[in-house]
Amino acid sequence: MTTDGIGASVKRKEDRRFLLGKGKYTDDITLPHQTHAVFVRSPHAHAKIKKIDLAKAKQSHGVLAVLTGDDVAADQLGGIPCGWLVKNKDGSNMVEPPHPALAQGKVRHVGDPVVMIVAHTKAEAKAAAALVDRREGGARA
């Protein structure tokens, strides 16, 4: 085993706290007036979104907002950017495909976020998410 370069053991300074159970995650943070978001995700690998009924979820206790891909687009919130700018071989910026925050019109993979529920507590958001009625049609060639 080498001491530097490819194949070298890399000492990671952040591991100790996680191995000792002292790591801090965003789910461990509690702030005053904090709200919680839960996503309703697609169980389909590729499908058209035919209908999303949000009525029951919107009426659920503690819910502050229920958002779909159409809401995100209407508010022009934009997508989720790539982690870093990738360059082409000629030095120009790579054309980055869109990465919408919530699926709009169709889902492209299992777990694609379709609806976001924001509520006072995580339990309230989860309960409202369970009330979302969605119809997705399978892939068509």
Image (tube, rainbow, N blue to C red):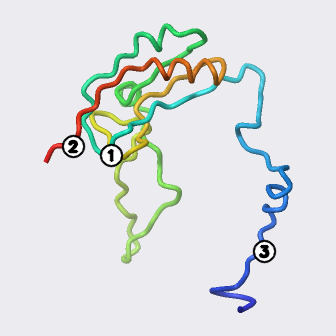
Which of disc 2 and disc 1 is earlier in sequence?
Answer: 1
**Callout 3, which amino acid?**
Lys
- Extreme residue in the left direction: 141
Task: Name the residue tied to disc 2.
Answer: 139
59 is higher (above) or lower (below) than 36? above
Alpha-carbon span between mark 1 and mark 2: 8 Å
Residue 138 pos. (x, y %):
23, 39
Which of disc 3 and disc 1 is earlier in sequence?
Answer: 3
Residue 54 pos. (x, y %):
40, 16
Alpha-carbon span between mark 3 and mark 2: 46 Å
Mark nearest the camera among 3 and 2 is 2
Residue drawn at x 71%, y 91% is 1
Q: Quadrant of residue 16?
A: bottom right
**Callout 2, which amino acid?**
Ala
Which of disc 2 and disc 3 is earlier in sequence?
Answer: 3
**Element at badge 1?**
loop
Q: Which mark is residue 11?
A: 3
Q: Residues within 10 Å of mark 2 (few under 14, many from 20)?
A: few
Q: Quadrant of residue 25?
A: top right
Tell which of 97 and 38 is nearer to you.
38
Q: Residues within 10 Å of mark 3 (few under 14, many from 20)?
A: few
Alpha-carbon span between mark 1 and mark 3: 38 Å
**Element at badge 2?**
loop
78 is higher (above) or lower (below) than 14? above
**Callout 1, which amino acid?**
Ala
Task: Name the residue tied to disc 1.
Answer: 45
Mark nearest the camera among 1 and 3 is 1
Residue 85 pos. (x, y %):
48, 61
Residue drawn at x 40%, y 64% is 93
Q: Residues within 10 Å of mark 1 (few under 14, many from 20)?
A: few
Residue drawn at x 65%, y 86% is 7
Residue 74 pos. (x, y %):
36, 26
